[in-house]
Structure formats: C-alpha cells, structure tokens
Image (spheres, grey):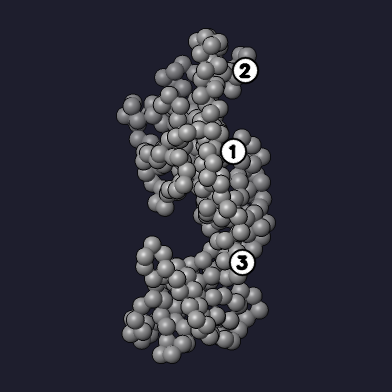
C-alpha cells in the first residue's frame, strides 16, 4: 500500500481494507515500491493527513471511505495498525473480562490442537494448556482420557470462507459426534450483513442450515477475540464439570447402565463418533485424514468389522 505523504509511505498488509478487523501494516522503505507495480486496487484519495501518532485516510468513494493508520507498540516493538471506527470499537468494546474461576474449577487443563496457529493463551485464568492433535475442534477438555467437549474457533473471514467451501459443514458434523461441542466466532453476527464480497443472505442461510442440521453444536458470536477466548474458557470449564459428574453417576449406576446421552433407543445401534472410527481405521492400517469427513468405504469397513 502506497500513501501520498511526504515522499510516499509504503506498507505491506494482508488486505485492501480493514473490513472486519484491524490490519497489521508493516512499513517498508519507499524504494521497495516497484517501478511497475501489479496493482490490486487503486482509489482516489480525498484526504490523507497525519495527526500525531495516526494517519487519517479518507477515500474518494461513497462506501468504505474513512479509516485510520495508528502507530503504536506491541510486545515492546513498534507496529502500525490500519483500522476503522467500527473495528476499533470492536477491539475495545468497553467490557472487562472477569478473572474468577469458571465453574469453580481450580486448575483446568485445556487441550489445544497442534494445528492451531494463534492459540488462546487464557492469560489471567487458572488454565494449563497441552498441545495435542485433536480429531475435531481447536480446544477441548478430557475426562479420563476421553474428549467430552470441544470448541472450534473462527474469525468471521474464516467462518465465511469455510462455509462457502463446504468444510465447515464437515467440521460441525464431526463436532456433533462429541458429547458437547460449539463453534465460537470472534465477531458480531451483524458482521455477516456487512459483507460486501459475498451475499450476506447466502452466509446467513448457510449458518441457519447448519444449526438446524446439528442443533447440538451452537454457533456463538462473541464479538471480539478476547471475549471469544473468555467464552471458550468458561464453556470448557462447565463441560469438564458436567463430564466428571456424568462419570460419577455412571459409576454409581453400574457398568450396565450407560449415561442417558449414550443410551441407544430400543432396537437401534448408535453410530460411533467419527473420532472413534478414525482411530480404528488408523489402527487397522487404513489411510484417513486428520480432520473432516471419512470416506464411505471407511465406514463400510468399520460396520463390517463390527457386524453391523
């Protein structure tokens, strides 16, 4: 991105406009701008003025025209963020997240999927994180070595792209096989209707279809990343308490009385969780992906091996 200030300011950034979140901008030397650049977008500028530690940028167009580049520090180094008034408000929604223990759990162990690149740190909470490959979800809690709940984290952009690509459907289907699961989105639901590169109705209808198809996997819009992290922590803590309570109840009832949620209807055989079939397939030497839907022949092999 080239701004007409002085001899020109050049930044490297990941998008052409900070639509859903503030964009990190990496300043580079003016001579790094190529003589014949391959332009992604060129827009007339109405105003570009530096005011202290910020640059107010106003474009000559009707929509998406006002933004600001802010010079600040993060983790001891200088950084520049490109933001809108809306994304700035979302980043600081004037709420303070509590530090009280969730569900009274003194030390919660949360399993973080090894493929999660920018994982929640759960700073300020009594949480121990463990990196481990998860069959589904990005964060999970276990009871007696069994995953009892998982949360899939999504930014709004990731939610939309995975929904349109069809991968979100498979991810939610895998989550539905767990006793408890949810999808948390680091944005507001209203952000769906501000999308400009895809029809908002298509996304809204797709999300509604997922909720009807798998009602046990709620899709929660938590407004910001810190609030999504807080929601994930408290959801998993509550699920951990629930899982341990269910285990204690099952132990009192005896081995022949499974928990109500795992009991099969009369005359039917419950379908196994995808994670269980995936583990069986690997142990049997079958090639299966780490995540997503299993091929029909894998399910057929499992049923044949178990007499179903």
Q: Residue, x 46% and y 16% (percent of image)?
A: 307
Q: Residue 55: where, in percent of width, then height?
A: 51, 80
| Label number found at residue 27 | none
**Which residue position is annotated with label 2?**
265
**Which residue position is annotated with label 1?**
217
Q: In whole angstroms, how far apart are the C-alphas of marks 3 and 2?
A: 50 Å
Q: In which quarter of the image is the N terminus?
A: bottom left
Q: Can residue 232 be seen in this view?
A: no
- 4 vs 291, nearest the viewer: 4
Q: In whole angstroms, how far apart are the C-alphas of marks 3 and 1?
A: 29 Å
Image height of 235 relative to 200, above or below: above
Q: Residue 15: where, in percent of width, then height?
A: 48, 69
| Labels 2, 1: front one | 1
Q: Earlier in the sequence, mark 3 or mark 2?
A: 3
Q: What secondary structure is marked by label 3? A: helix
Q: Residues within 10 Å of mark 1 (few under 14, many from 20)?
A: many
Q: What secondary structure is marked by label 1? A: loop
Q: Is residue 249 visible?
A: yes
- 79 vs 178, nearest the viewer: 79
Q: Quadrant of residue 200?
A: bottom right
Q: Residue, x 50% and y 81% (percent of image)?
A: 52
Q: Residue, x 36% and y 68% (percent of image)?
A: 77
Q: Quadrant of residue 277?
A: top left
Q: Residues within 10 Å of mark 2 (few under 14, many from 20)?
A: few
**Which residue position is annotated with label 3?**
86
Q: Earlier in the sequence, mark 2 or mark 1?
A: 1
Q: Earlier in the sequence, mark 3 or mark 1?
A: 3
Q: Residue 148: where, in percent of width, then height?
A: 50, 30
């Amino acid at each position: 991105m080239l701004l007409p200030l002085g001899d020109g300011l050049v930044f490297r950034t990941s998008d052409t406009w900070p639509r859903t979140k503030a964009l990190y901008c990496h300043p580079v030397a003016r001579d790094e701008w190529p003589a014949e650049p391959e332009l992604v977008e060129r827009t007339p500028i109405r105003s570009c003025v530096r005011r202290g530690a910020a640059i107010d940028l106003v474009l000559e167009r009707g929509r998406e025209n006002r933004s600001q580049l802010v010079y600040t520090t993060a983790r001891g180094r200088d950084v520049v963020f490109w933001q809108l008034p809306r994304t700035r408000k979302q980043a600081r929604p004037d709420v303070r997240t509590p530090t009280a223990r969730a569900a009274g759990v003194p030390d919660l162990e949360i399993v973080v999927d090894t493929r999660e690149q920018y994982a929640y740190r759960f700073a300020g909470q009594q949480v121990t994180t463990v990196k481990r490959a998860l069959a589904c979800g990005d964060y999970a809690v276990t009871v007696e070595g069994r995953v009892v709940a998982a949360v899939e984290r999504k930014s709004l952009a990731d939610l939309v792209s995975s929904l349109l690509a069809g991968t979100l459907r498979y991810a939610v289907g895998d989550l539905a096989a767990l006793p408890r699961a949810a999808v948390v989105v680091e944005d507001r639901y209203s952000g769906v209707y501000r999308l400009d590169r895809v029809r908002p109705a298509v996304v809204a209808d797709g999300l509604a279809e997922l909720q009807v198809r798998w009602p046990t996997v709620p899709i929660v819009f938590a407004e910001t990343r810190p609030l999504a992290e807080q929601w994930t922590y408290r959801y998993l803590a509550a699920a951990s308490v629930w899982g341990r309570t269910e285990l204690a109840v099952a132990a009192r009832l005896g081995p022949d009385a499974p928990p109500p949620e795992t009991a099969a209807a009369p005359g039917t055989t419950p379908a196994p969780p995808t994670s269980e079939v995936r583990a069986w397939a690997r142990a049997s030497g079958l090639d299966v992906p780490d995540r997503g839907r299993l091929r029909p022949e894998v399910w057929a092999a499992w049923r044949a091996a178990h007499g179903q």
